[in-house]
Amino acid sequence: MSYSVYRINLPESPEAVVFVNGFVARNRAGFFWMWKQLLWIKNVTAKAKGCMQVKAGICSLNEVIMVSYWVSENSLKEFFRGEPHRQMMQFIAKNPQSLCLYNETYSPLHSGKYINEPQGMATIYARS
């Protein structure tokens, strides 16, 4: 079996960030909102300026997680100030007990390992 394995060359001070966010439905309203909006959230995030890739995963029937790769923290912050994010947060404002939301932002410390094609951080930084 043959496949290519590579690592990326990160700059000394990488600007790119990884944004991990999750949704946990806490009641019926949250459950239906989450599943109705999930694809839209993934698509508007992927189209945002500075977003290079979005991955979505199902943790359970009432929990999903998204990981997005951004060229810079400023690009991510700009997305937070935009209309799509405001629309996402409207549901929370009207239904504060329906969802548990969480997010974390990470900067790469070293290259990941990539097999066969660029994914994640490798979509931002060139292959070595």
Image: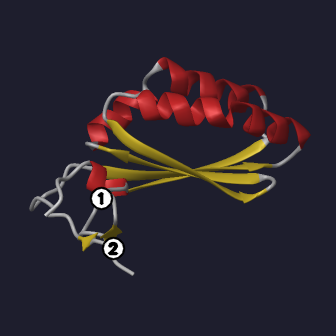
Q: Label 1 vs label 2: CA separation?
A: 28 Å
Image quarter of residue 46:
top left
In the structure shown, which secondary structural element does the residue marked by tag 2 occupy?
loop
Q: Nearer the viewer, residue 13 or 10?
A: 10
Q: Tag 1: residue type?
A: Ser
Q: Nearer the viewer, residue 67 or 97?
A: 67
What is the x, y in percent for residue 14?
18, 55
User: In the orientation shown, which residue stands out farthest toward the left?
Assistant: 12
Can residue 96 be seen at all in this image of the molecule? no
Which residue is disc 1 drawn over?
A: 107
What is the x, y in percent for residue 62?
79, 52
Q: Tag 2: residue type?
A: Tyr
User: In the orientation shown, which residue stands out farthest toward the front?
Assistant: 1
Q: Where is 53 relative to 77, above or below?
A: below
Which residue is disc 2 drawn over?
A: 3
The structure residue drawn at horizontal position 38% and vertical position 53%, both measured from the top left corner, is 18
What is the x, y in percent for residue 55?
51, 50
